[in-house]
Image (cartoon, grey):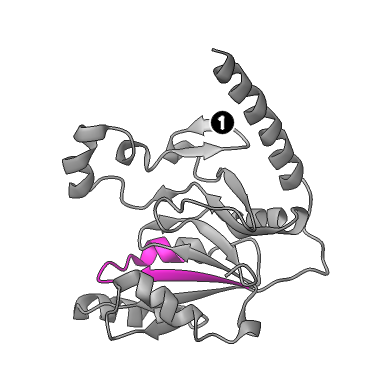
Amino acid sequence: MGIAFRYQFIKKKEQQKELAILNKPLPQNWHPRVKLLYTTYNDFIPYAFAECLNQTYDNVQGVILDNSTDEKYIKMIRQFTKTHPDVQWVRNVPNKQAKAGNLNNYLCHQPKDSYDYFVILDSDELLERKFVEKCLKFFYNSDNLGILQCNHISGQNYNAFMDLFSNSGNIFWPVQNVVRSVESGLREPASAKNNYQTHVVERGGTVCIELGHGVMISRECF
């Protein structure tokens, strides 16, 4: 019982600290470049990435890191880049470690001055419009911050994998699409699309990137 009360006390204090940061404006003379790295391997979802690109923060570039082998998805990506000419399309045809290898291939060959922060997106990722803006507030107002892990929602609310494994544990997959918000508590996805909770990880610590995405990382930390 004591542990539960202690947890509630610590949680409330952390929430107050996070809200104080979110209420601060970004300085006008600080304008870092952010890349949204959308990884896809035969699972491109145009509407999901289009929504992620719709950010209130303006210094953002979308990059499609594509390992697709199915011509159907390659054609979809080609069409998307025609209608979104600012989006960069990177094909890593040798399919080494799928999406993870795709990220390594891109990040390890980028000039250091081409970005300041990057966000890892999966194919069905949905970001609120203020996602980048809010994350940058934490980076600017926190000392030694290298990674920001965020809860998020999925564009595909149910699939065969979830159907097969959720009954065995009934813990992770059923709550994949529920958003915990530091601003408004726990809500269902449809009513909480614009609310996300951020988790601060200091440099030198460890982080569990649970789904491999929904995370912003600084160039210096990487």
Q: Amino acid at mark 1?
A: Gly
Instruction: Give residue 104's position: percent from left, percent from top.
Output: 43, 76
Q: Which residues are magenta?
A: 34-50
Q: Could you tell me which residue is drawn at 48 percent across and 37 percent down?
A: 191
In the figure, is residue 21 to the left or right of 107?
Answer: right
Number of marks: 1
Name the quarter where the C terminus is drawn.
Answer: bottom right
Give whichever of 198, 50 is nearer the camera: 198
Q: Could you tell me which residue is drawn at 51 percent across and 31 percent down?
A: 186
Instruction: Give residue 2's position: percent from left, percent from top.
Output: 58, 14
Instruction: Give residue 160's position: percent from left, percent from top.
Output: 17, 48
Q: Could you tell me which residue is drawn at 36 percent across and 67 percent down?
A: 46
Secondary structure found at label 1: strand
Residue 222 sits above or below residue 10 on the image: below
Q: Could you tell me which residue is drawn at 83 percent across and 69 percent down?
A: 29
Name the quarter where the N terminus is drawn.
Answer: top right
Residue 122 sits above or below residue 158 on the image: below
Badge 1 is on which residue?
185
